[in-house]
Image (cartoon, rainbow, N blue to C red):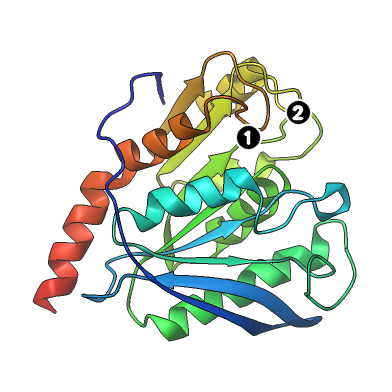
Amino acid sequence: MHDSCRLFWPPMSSTHESKNFFLRGPAGNLEAVLWTPPAAAPGIAALVCHPHPLFGGTMHNKVVFQAAKALDSLGIAVLRFNFRGAGLSEGIHDKGRGELDDVRAALQYLAVEFPGTPLLVAGFSFGCWVGLRAGCDDARAEKLIGIGAPVNNSDFSYLAKCAKPKLFVHGSNDEHGDVEKVRQMMASLPGENELVVVDGVDHFFTGKIDELGKAITGWLKPAAHNAMKSSAHD
């Protein structure tokens, strides 16, 4: 595990094509937004999952949006969607069980839309707990990003069998995930894992939201660069 507060590479600017649509989920249509780079085919396609819908979480949450912007700045296709019962999505909240199937449906959409493209799963809070579980189980998802992992009250034991590269970004004062518990969890995980702690912020990175974007681009930029080169040669 790498526990680092050092941040590299400022986010690059990017323009994208934006598509608002409904993807078919297991409990009905799921409201979604897809950003795609306008020029070349993306080397990576990412899914970003939002926080708890019963507490106001949607795909338009500021932390989710910031993560999507950081991924977009690297020329990555980015899909966000509302879990069942959130926003205009059909269905009702299912305490993470049905939401896991929602994530799987979104990953399947990305796999069809960008065939052969490596997938990445990112999630914030509830979206971290549900999203990373689906990402661990899906062979097409090669990297995972957990933001504000709610380790105080959620079971992340499934990560013990997940050797995929993982980035965790966490506020030092996160009220839903004690940062020492995050460190303890990560110490037991297989594979390459990095933790970036943003000092002096709460669960929502209040006042330092840009640090989240810097952490994501710093960790992912080499892989995104290599994936774009590979995609250009295909």
Question: Disc 2 residue type?
Answer: His
Is 127 left or right of 69, judged from the image as shown? right
Q: Residue at x 27, y 67 (%)?
A: 43
**SS under mark 2:** loop
Q: What amino acid is at disc 1?
A: Gly
Q: Which residue sits furthest left?
A: 233
SS type, badge 1: loop
- Which residue is found at the position 40% from the left and 40% from the top? 216
Asked whether residue 186 appears in the rendered view, the answer is yes
Query: Is residue 149 shown left or right of residue 192?
Result: right
Residue identified by numbered label 1: 148
Q: Which image quadrant: the N terminus?
A: top left
Q: Is mark 2 in CB contact (under 8 Å) with mark 1? A: yes
Position in image of residue 79 (x %, y %): 52, 67
Residue at position x 63%, y 77% in the image: 105
Quarter-wise, where is residue 176 in the image? top right
The disc placed on residue 176 is: 2
